[in-house]
Image (cartoon, rainbow, N blue to C red):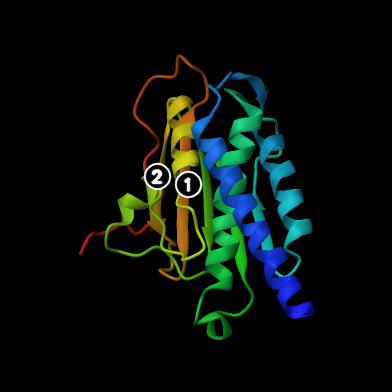
């Protein structure tokens, strides 16, 4: 009886999560950028993720001085949370976890001379598939049986509304995933998005 009850509760929670994600995607609010400290936004998301995943080592490479930019804090926090949540799931699903050691997620924040902000989330999980990688940004596309395929689609939409984008890369050491979020620091920022940092492995299609 207890086992059946636990199964029912878990299934109900899964259904609720799916409904919430479908609703969020269908009613995605328009971004309302305001001047805010991007570094503090990232720190708050990391704090919550550290509390929720004490078994994972979180590293941050954030500037000490405030990095003021124009962005929608609520939406960008949601995008960053979705990406880090995916990273924790990639670590949990990694069949080579014993060989790689503890799960690690590194989050870095930088700005390039042209005025573009770059948030890099690198994990040592199972990484992204090489084939059809770009399709993971499409709605309802997922590699997990329990996934809805909306997490990265929501992230892509949020960054698009901020005038930026998202890249799905391999971790610099080839052992894990690298998600790069970028958008202009100000709405009038000129120049191309920041170049991929040295050592990054570009996604390849088979």
Residue at 23% in and 59% down: 205
- Mark 1, residues whose alpha carbon is within 10 Å: few (<14), some, or many (≥20)? many
Residue furthest top in the image? 188
Tell me the element at label 2: loop
x, y percent for residue 103: 62, 71
Mark 2 vs mark 1, CA separation in Å:
5 Å
Can residue 35 be seen from the camera position used here? Answer: yes
In the rendered image of this protein, does residue 33 appear above or below residue 15? above
Question: Residue 204 got which mark?
Answer: none
Question: Residue 150 got which mark?
Answer: 1
For the residue pair 21 and 158, the one nearer the viewer reads as 21
For the residue pair 85 and 203, the one nearer the viewer reads as 85
Tell me the element at label 1: loop
Residue furthest bottom in the image? 98
x, y percent for residue 67: 64, 30
Residue at 61% in and 25% down: 72
The earlier-in-sequence mark between 2 and 1 is 2
x, y percent for residue 20: 61, 43
Asked if labels 1 and 2 touch by Cβ distance under 8 angstroms, the answer is: yes
Question: Residue 139 got which mark?
Answer: 2
- Mark 2, residues whose alpha carbon is within 10 Å: few (<14), some, or many (≥20)? some
Q: Choose top left, top right, bottom left or bottom right for residue 1.
A: bottom right
Residue at 20% in and 64% down: 206
Instruction: Judge from the rendering whether residue 191 lies leftward or rightward of residue 148; answer left or right.
Output: left
x, y percent for residue 120: 51, 48
Instruction: Judge from the rendering whether residue 155 lies leftward or rightward of residue 77; answer left or right.
Output: left
For the residue pair 51 and 112, the one nearer the viewer reads as 51
Count the marks: 2
């Amino acid at each position: 009886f207890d086992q059946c009850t636990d199964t029912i509760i878990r299934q109900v929670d899964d259904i609720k999560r799916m409904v919430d994600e479908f609703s969020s995607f269908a009613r995605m609010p328009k971004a309302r950028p305001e001047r805010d400290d991007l570094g503090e936004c990232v720190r708050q998301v990391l704090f919550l993720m550290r509390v929720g995943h004490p078994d994972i080592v979180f590293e941050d490479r954030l500037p000490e001085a405030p990095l003021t930019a124009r962005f929608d804090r609520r939406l960008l926090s949601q995008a960053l949370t979705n990406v880090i949540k995916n990273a924790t799931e990639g670590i949990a699903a990694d069949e080579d976890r014993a060989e790689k050691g503890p799960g690690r997620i590194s989050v870095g924040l930088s700005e390039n001379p042209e005025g573009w902000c770059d948030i890099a989330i690198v994990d040592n999980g199972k990484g992204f598939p090489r084939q059809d990688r770009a399709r993971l940004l499409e709605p309802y596309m997922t590699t997990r049986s329990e996934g809805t395929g909306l997490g990265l689609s929501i992230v892509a939409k949020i960054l698009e509304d901020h005038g930026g984008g998202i890249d799905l890369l391999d971790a610099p050491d080839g052992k894990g995933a690298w998600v790069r979020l970028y958008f202009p620091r100000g709405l009038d920022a000129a120049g191309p998005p920041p170049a991929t940092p040295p050592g990054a492995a570009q996604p390849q299609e088979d």
